Amino acid sequence: MEKIVTRHFGQPNSHRLENYLKDNGYEAARKALTQMTPAAVIDEVKKSNLRGLGGAGFPTGTKWSFIPQANPKPKYLVINGDEGEPGTFKDKYILEQDPHALLEGIIITCYAIGSHKAYVYIRGEYLKSLQILQAAVDEAYKANYLGRGIMGTGFDIDVVVHPGAGAYICGEETALLESLEGKKGFPRLKPPFPAVVGLFGCPTVINNVETISCIAPIINKGADWYAKLGCEKNGGNRLFCISGHVVKPGIYELPNGITLREIIYDHAGGIPNGRKLKAVIPGGISAPILTPDQIDVKMDFDSLKAIGSMAGSGGIIVMDDTTDMVWAAMVAARFFAHESCGQCSPCREGSGWVYRNVKRIYQGQAKPHDLNNLPGIVNNIGGNTICAFGDAVSMSVGSYVTKFRSEFEAKIKGEYAESKH
Amino acid sequence: MPNLSIDGKQIEVPAGTTIIQAADKLGISIPRYCYHPALPVSGNCRICMVEVEKQPKLQIACYTPVADGMVVKTNSPKVLEVRKTVLEFLLVNHPVDCPVCDQAGECKLQDYYMEHGQYDSRLSDVKVKKEKKAFSIGPTVMLDQERCILCTRCVRFADNITKTSEFGVFSRGDHSQLDIYPGKQLDNAYSGNVVDICPVGALTDKDFRFKCRVWYLSQTKSVCPGCSMGCNITVEWDKMRPHVHKNARVMRLKPRLNQDVNQYWICDKGRYNYRFIDENRIQHPQFKDNLITWDEAVGVIARAIKPLQDSNQTNRIGVIASAQLTNEDLFAVRKFFKETLKGAQVDFRMPENPGDSDNFLIKADKNPNTAGALNILQADAQVEQIVQKAVKGEIDVLYVFGHDLVKIFSKETVAQIAKKVKLFVYQGSNINETCGYAHLNLPSSVYAEKEGTFTNCQQKVQRIWPAFLPLAEAKSDWQIISLLSAELGAPLAYHHAQEIFKDIAANLAPFSEMTYEKIADKGMVLKA
């Protein structure tokens, strides 16, 4: 199977410009800048069916086409590298193994949207990734792949690498913009969307690290090639991050359209020690949990949505039959309570309330009404907040209660001994 | 212009209007915490969510612009349900300490909960402890972090209105706390307004807290007499509980909305300038050391004036009127001293140093009615000249309205005046040093005790209303002048301030066509 984003992973000095140039590096950028119009680049990306791999799955080319070119303000490209979704660790590897693939994607994207400045916002904890990317940016400036009149084309582009300060919510694109502007990371009210009013009030495209790393190969090999790798409306491969109870956890680049069963059993080696699968989170902790009878689902955005979950960030967390699902729900709830930004009331107050409620159930200190109330409380958060974080609390924690209710009931009846966790 | 329907009522509003603004126009009140019409929209409280036809999710009314053909429901079961849930969330970590909270009675958490509450509490966890309770954040305001619902109105007020940015929300999630920035104090000229806009008991007014439960308060519309801006205010008073606060009637002043004058705000100087209404008042007419009746008092004055009138020496009468007086009072001064007693020396323009000012509401001219006085009372002399004449003994009767001459001139000058003039009358509401030198002190009522109008620096004529009767024997300045003119055989035919205003409108072109009804509570601008 053809690798795209991970094609250089594991090569010696894969992060160095020298290595990147061996494999036609920066030729896609040269091709775009010298042989294509910006509109043609956007068209090509549209045709490739590339969708936003940060988690929302929005068609990338379409997003770019929303930039109002008549607007006299500068346009910005912002790369979202604030990878904070539990179970997700793909962007980290891209930044460390192949930063020039991202930079080449940035050049092409900036050209397509008429931007001359890109910011890469990197999760604060990713210090090593940040250092490697900064070194790559320095190399690229030196070799005139970035800076004034790059590659003799007359096109100017600056790339700024910016570390976040450790808030999950800053991965939400408008909170990221606020943070980048030096403010507290609070998501903005929408509309207006960033394409119209984004960074510093200017038209802005925000894309994930993985998404932009796919751009150069698409320009090099063509949209049709890329689209065919995936499934309908969801072109190409994607990086799946598998963790939890599997024999071979790690990152796997696999085509969209592969099933969850194939990923777990054929690629990740199945469940260790002959134990059975109990539950699996298919796309980061925000995605509703799935039961073993659901794992024949295809892992593209639309198929997962159809069964009430989501492809999200591609973070697959596998849980075997030793897992206490109330504990798992509590861990998820604790994460949300810890990371709620606190801006709007349902999420601010609700996420903590949900956590304390689940914790009480887990600790055997709950009464039946605590469990009866839980789905309602969770539902009251979702759909009523400024950003999608509230929906995530609602869908994620709600799914444990719906699918594993008997375990919650057992805690209340005291049938479970104090859990080992 | 988009035409939409809210709860079945049609309304046409300009494009860009939000649903909550359109609903307000229709008189449909959508609950709100973070929304304030004078502040940028924040959209964080989520209580204003309404149902918009063809939209799958409820929308926040404060942020969603109207569209043509939009159908909005503000009281559908879905909307009522979400209000309950938002209130429930807001109370998760709220202490519900209403019995000891000064906001009780004017708290939007209480008000909305009465209407939309869950009643059977589902909350059984220990609440998140917040750091600051009854914590002083500046000279005027106390902060209670656990009562705060983090609507950020105060933050946006300080960021956008005063541009002093004292407030911030610190920490994250349900540990978020409203606070002022480290090392800062909430100490700006408009700080008290954050108490008004705080919908709950998080920010309370040091001056007012624990003084009086708000349900004992009556409200009277008025205008701040503190400077020439004429900010619209409400006098809030309590006469039912005289045992509280030494018989004081006024408990606090609040700003009253007037988009053309002060919008929603008043300055702190104006807000806390009310104690003079109940304290340090002249209560009875007093001649030298003796308390006397009004009849006796006007008799004293009449006996001093009559010979001057009879001998055509009215120029030996000096009158120092005041721009603190209402238009009605000033018109009575004009009628009596300038028309009946032709020749009296009248002025009101005190040689005062200009006070502090800014480019918002605080004006250097600390008189509420300079514009009115200039139109009503053409001066015959200057105050300095009148005082000089009095010192030299060229004036027999000096009649001073409210001014503390000692402060502006000097003790020596005023003592000299008291020696030289035959009758030195001080007519005012409060005791000052000049009273000690005056031969006759007459108690006049304060602005909160009388009906009338002030003309502010925008040439806007604005009404004040009496909140309560004058203290003790005090009377409106025009009433005192009426008594005096009756005593001298030329009675002014006024029984009510409104009759004087009718006369003003009939005689003075800038006021023509004005009536109390037309001025109402928003004011009318003088004709050029």
Image (cartoon, coloured by chain):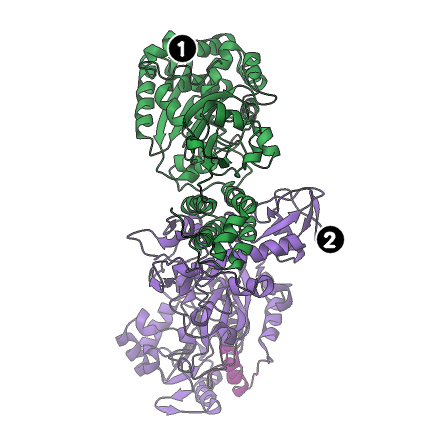
Nearest to the eye among marks 2 and 1: give it. 1
| CA–CA distance in space, label 2 to label 1 | 63 Å
Q: Any magenta on residue B21?
A: no
Shade of chain A as shown in the rendered figure: green
**What residue is disc 1 on?**
A25
Q: Quadrant of the C terminus of chain B?
A: bottom right
**What residue is disc 2 on?**
B8
Whole-percent x, y for residue B333 in the image? 50, 75
Residue appearing at x 33%, y 31% in the figure: A126
From what the image shows, is residue B351 above or below residue A254? Answer: below
Q: Chain of mark 2?
A: B
**Given the image, on which type of amino acid does mark 1 rest?**
Gly
| Chain shaded purple | B
Whole-percent x, y for residue B119 in the image? 56, 65
Identify the element where label 2 is drawn. Answer: loop
Q: Quadrant of the N terminus of chain B?
A: top right
Whole-percent x, y for residue A101 in the image? 41, 17
Identify the element where label 1 is drawn. Answer: loop
Taking B399 as reference, is B56 left or right?
Answer: right
Q: Are marks 2 and 1 on the same chain?
A: no
Q: Chain of mark 1?
A: A
Local packing at callout 2 (Cα closer than 10 Å; few below 14, some 14-19, many 20+) is few
Range of magenta residues: B474-492
